[in-house]
Amino acid sequence: DAGVTQSPTHLIKTRGQQVTLRCSPKSGHDTVSWYQQALGQGPQFIFQYYEEEERQRGNFPDRFSGHQFPNYSSELNVNALLLGDSALYLCASSFRGDYEQYFGPGTRLTVT
Amino acid sequence: QKEVEQNSGPLSVPEGAIASLNCTYSDRGSQSFFWYRQYSGKSPELIMFIYSNGDKEDGRFTAQLNKASQYVSLLIRDSQPSDSATYLCAVEYAGNNRKLIWGLGTSLAVNP
């Protein structure tokens, strides 16, 4: 049973650049949620995708956008990167928008 | 008042002891409660969820929920050094804006 996968594992970008992170949900799941986790903090909810639509959104600026594909995989896009965007980006999948979520290994983004 | 509060720790217990982790929440409309374990540099791993008042046991782990007092706890029996990690509490708020709120986590150290 395939778990949640994310790519890339690590990424280094420069301020002002754009980045795309990818996530494939656990087999049987149709909902993807994205989180940002800074060092020493709990995960901060960015948004959730279900049925290819953004269903909920946390307190993140419009620079953060996403997409869900018909196969339930998802992308997170961040434009005009800031130093403060450096964090671990986590993808979690679940079924029908449920919050019993399973996390992928994360993408460590460093903005210089 | 923070919506979900946890003692940051570190909580230190000897190997074989019972570790008790606590979480309080502010919204009485909360529906579901989750405990995640996160090792340093890794993503959160779901270990327990509980929806109803009382105790729920799974192996060495017991989740306890008291909605009247607005707290949820996690007990780890026969603690092992491999249990050393940060334990995150997450609470699902129902209503028009259904969302999952995370605590900052409690660091647990199990000493051999």
Image (tube, rainbow, N blue to C red):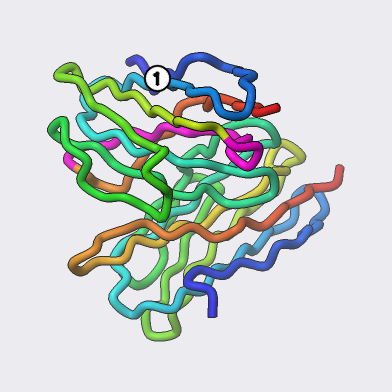
SS label for mark 1: strand
Pick the residue in front: B37 or B104. B104
Q: Is residue A40 above or below residue B32?
A: above
> Where's residue A91, x and y in %?
42, 32
Residue A102 image position (x, y, % from top left): 39, 35
Q: Residue at x 51, y 41 (%)?
A: A36
Can you tell which quarter of the image residue A13 is in?
top right
Apparent side of residue A107 relative to residue A59 in the rendered image (left or right): right
Considering depth in this image, is B105 or B11 the residue closer to the camera?
B105
Q: Is residue B111 above or below residue A59?
A: above
Give the residues drawn in magenta, as a range.
A82-96
Tally the numbered discs. Answer: 1
User: Can you name the residue that lies furthest to the right here?
Assistant: B112
Please report, as a chain letter, where disc 1 is located.
A
Classify the position of the N terminus of chain B by image quarter.
Answer: bottom right
Residue B64 vs residue B15: left or right? left
Q: Which residue is mark 1?
A: A22
Note whether B27 is above or below A43 in the view shown. Answer: below
- Residue B59, horizontal then vertical, whole percent: 50, 45
* Residue located 43% across and 21% down the image: A20
> Would residue A60 be found to the left or right of residue B44 on screen?
left
Nearest to the observer: residue B84 or residue A41: A41
Q: Residue at x 67, y 57 (%)?
A: B106
Indicate yes or no whether the magenta region holds residue A15.
no
Q: Residue furthest bottom?
A: B68
